[in-house]
Amino acid sequence: MKSHFTDVINRVLRQSCEEMFAAYGAHDMRVSGSSGTWSLQAAEEKPEVAGIAPFTGSRMRGRIVIASSFKFFVRVRPKDAKSPALSERSSGDWLLVRDWAAELANQLLGRVKNRMSTFAIRLEVGLPTAMSGDSLSVALPRADKKPLVFSNSREQALVWLDATLDEDPDLAVPKEGGGGFAREGDVLLF
Amino acid sequence: MGIRVLVVDDSMTVRQQVSSTLMAAGFEVVEAVDGLDAATKIESMAGLGMVLCDVNMPRMNGIEMLERVKANPSCAGVPIVMLTTEGRPELIAKAKALGAKGWLVKPCAPDALVATVRKLTAAT
């Protein structure tokens, strides 16, 4: 039986990701497929880079992963007018793309964490990392995991939560006094 | 030469983005890769107008850096603003109590970032 709390997590993850992609110009990325099923063997476009953001909490712990192509991460990377276009042929540019993938996972986790506060769930974030090349295979979703598959006509990005959850249905209920977190883009001066 | 701002973040992309935005607005920018690097630079650098600092970083996080710098009379007066994905009210309160001048939640719009830096560097 599907847990209500898992539904909440997936909804929060999806909304957070849509907002984050939009913030970086990828308004056209939408969740595709009825259940987001995905397999490495069947994938038309295999991910090249993954950003990984770990977290711990009393009711859930694990990591958020976002995986896609070099080109997609370059497209959503903030543009620096002084920097030339990044190239897959440059090892230095791969470092920049890996760095950005890690930061993107970090920002996605931040959005999820802030929203989970509504349910009185507190998460502690760890330091984000990135993977690419042969090591990427250990980061990709297992057969029992159904990632969110965002895509447009040309690109695909996988996003999933690899975590152990306390499946208590009470967790799915917003709590009085929950929330109160600062949100993305907030400017607080003291 | 513009007012000098120290940008602290373990992400190269964030440092590049923030630095580029501030330099385009006329500020001089110095970078640090984590809290320890930042604390060392703040304690040794003359003429620093302001610090923009991430929270979650290796070796020394932003709150630890804030605490160390504000405890040092030689540099306690430098305005420090946190730039982070964190939104926890208790963390914001802690930073405020330690002497931070502000808290920006990523992603921060470039014009809001520049306005914040201009406001706080004009006040010193």
Image: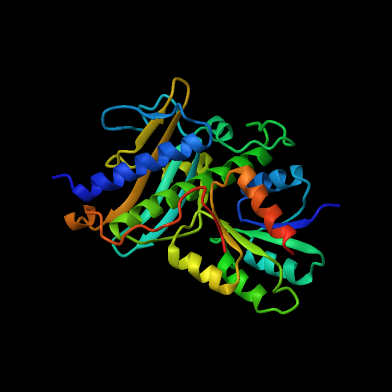
Measuring from the top left, give residue A84's x and y in whole percent.
72, 32
Measuring from the top left, give residue A179's x and y in whole percent.
35, 57
Left or right of B22 in this view: A33 = left
Which residue occupies 35% across, 36% down?
A: A148
Measuring from the top left, give residue B19's x and y in whole percent.
71, 48
Residue A107, placed above or below residue B94: above
Question: Would you say residue B98 is visible in this rendering?
Answer: yes
Q: How many marks?
A: 0
Left or right of B16 in this view: A145 = left
Which residue occupies 49% across, 50% down?
A: A106
Give the colouring mode of the picture: rainbow
Left or right of A55 in this view: A175 = left
Which residue appears farthest toward the top when viewing the image? A153
Which residue appears farthest toward the left when viewing the image? A1
Residue A123 occupies quadrant: bottom left
Measuring from the top left, give residue A126's x and y in whole percent.
47, 59
Which residue occupies 61% across, 38% down?
A: A78
Residue B74, placed above or below residue A132: below
Which residue occupies 26% across, 60% down?
A: A176
Question: Would you say residue B61 is visible in this rendering?
Answer: no
- Quarter of the image that includes the C terminus of chain B: bottom right
Residue nearest the viewer, comparing A103 with A42: A103
